[in-house]
Structure formats: structure tokens, C-alpha cells
Image (spheres, rainbow, N blue to C red):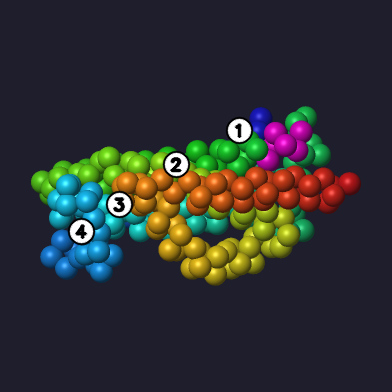
């Protein structure tokens, strides 16, 4: 029942997200005029090993991950399952009162499914990027791209949990606006997290641990706030 409710509420937004990720994956970087970030990356051991063009592709792809995670959390899968994300406030309802499930299971299922949906979008963007590069007869740096997506998972989980918590405190549209400065402030951290392993052979465990801690705290806050608000 929970999964069916989730599918009914997000199917149209997931379709729009899928179309947007295909469009992003189809964008190929300018190999003749690489960005400053790509030029800096060319001096790293990995870039020298995989080649100039692969380094440019990988840098452009890594920059898309942060924005895609934010779009998925704020526009496609906003909410916690406790109330619909796009209905007016006076029509919103708490499904915990009508479904024979616990709050923890409801929130965990909804946000877990949101992460799965966003990861499918990541995979779709990666597949589209690979297909476009192969059509253009260019090499595909599959390993660095896949590793970047793997390190983007905790960032995606944190975004989903934080936005879900904000949606309980204020209207959904205000929650979206509140995440914009957070996104801008965390761009350098996001870029380092999804590129550290591939670029310098580092494991950004501190950043990953911080993201997991944020996820747990936001989830706990959502659960507690829902309990207080319902009773």
C-alpha cells in the first residue's frame, strides 16, 4: 500500500526528472575549450593516465551530480510520505492516521524510495552520456564516472532527509527556497566528495560521515516532529 501510494504521488514528477536527466546526459563538454576545473584536473595522476578527453568528460559529469541530487530532492521527491508534496496546505493529510503502518516505516519507505528513484536518474544520466560519447566515437571513462556516482549516494540521502524535514516545518515552496543557499554553500564540498577518490586517490570519509550524520539527524527530527504534530 505504501509503495503504491508513493508511486501515485511521484510518477509524473519522476517522468519529468527522467526527461531532464536524459537531456543533461546528452550534453557533451567542449573539448576544444575545457573549463578551468578540467584544466586543473589534467595535472592529476588519474587524468594523465586516462587521457585529456576522458578527464574533461569526467569533470563535466561530476559537476552535474550535485545539481541533479538537489533537483531530485526538492522537485521530484519532496516530502516524507506524511502529506502530499504539491497539494495546498489546507488539503494536506497525514497518511499515518489512515494506514496500518508505523511512522518510522512510512517515512523510511518514502525517503528510501526517493533515493532509489534518484539513483535511477543518476544511472539514466550515466547511460545517456555513455551512448552519446560512443555515437561520437569518443572514449568513455566509465570507472571514474561510476565511482563519482557511488560517492554521491550519501549526498543524495542527506538532501532527501533535510528537504523532507524542512517540508514539515514550512510550506513546500518555502522549503525549496531555503535549500538554495545551502546548495550554493556546499558546491565545493559536493565536488570534492564525488571526485576525491578518482582525482587524487583519496577517500573522503570525513565528508561521507558528515553526510550520514546529517541524514540520521534530519530523519530523527522528522520522526519526532511528526509524532508531536499528530498528537
| Label 1 secondary element | helix
- The CA span between labels 3 and 2 is 22 Å
Please name the residue shown 55% across and 57% down the image: 74
Marks 4 and 3, the one that precedes in the sequence:
4
Residue 47 visible in this rendered orientation of the protein: yes
Whole-percent x and y of residue 58? 27, 52
Marks 3 and 2, the one that precedes in the sequence:
2
Pointer 2 residue: 119
Please name the residue shown 57% across and 46% down the image: 212
Pointer 1 residue: 3
Mark 3 Cα shell of 10 Å, populated few (<14), some (14-19), many (≥20): many
Whole-percent x and y of residue 152? 44, 47
* Of residues 162 and 11, the one drawn nearer to the viewer in this rendering: 162
- The CA span between labels 4 and 1 is 45 Å
Q: Check if residue 131 falls in the magenta segment.
A: no
Quarter location, residue 163: bottom right
Amino acid at each position: 500500500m505504501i509503495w503504491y501510494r508513493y508511486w501515485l504521488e511521484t510518477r509524473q514528477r519522476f517522468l519529468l526528472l527522467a526527461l531532464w536527466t536524459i537531456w543533461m546526459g546528452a550534453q557533451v563538454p567542449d573539448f576544444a575549450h575545457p573549463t578551468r576545473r578540467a584544466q586543473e584536473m589534467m595535472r592529476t595522476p588519474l587524468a594523465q593516465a586516462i587521457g585529456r578527453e576522458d578527464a574533461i568528460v569526467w569533470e563535466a559529469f561530476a559537476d552535474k551530480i550535485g545539481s541533479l541530487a538537489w533537483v531530485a530532492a526538492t522537485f521530484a521527491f519532496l516530502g516524507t510520505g506524511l502529506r502530499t508534496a504539491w497539494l495546498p496546505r489546507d488539503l494536506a493529510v497525514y497518511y499515518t492516521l489512515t494506514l496500518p503502518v508505523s511512522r518510522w516505516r512510512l517515512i523510511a519507505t518514502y525517503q528510501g524510495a526517493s533515493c532509489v528513484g534518484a539513483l535511477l536518474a543518476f544511472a539514466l544520466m550515466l547511460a545517456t552520456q555513455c551512448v552519446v560519447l560512443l555515437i561520437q566515437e569518443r572514449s568513455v571513462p566509465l570507472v571514474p564516472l561510476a565511482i563519482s556516482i557511488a560517492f554521491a549516494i550519501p549526498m543524495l540521502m542527506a538532501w532527501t532527509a533535510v528537504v523532507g524535514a524542512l517540508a514539515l516545518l514550512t510550506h513546500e515552496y518555502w522549503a525549496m527556497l531555503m535549500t538554495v543557499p545551502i546548495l550554493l554553500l556546499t558546491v565545493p564540498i559536493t565536488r570534492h566528495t564525488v571526485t576525491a577518490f578518482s582525482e587524487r586517490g583519496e577517500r573522503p570519509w570525513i565528508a561521507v560521515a558528515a553526510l550520514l550524520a546529517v541524514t540520521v539527524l534530519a530523519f530523527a527530527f522528522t520522526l519526532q516532529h511528526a509524532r508531536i504534530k499528530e498528537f
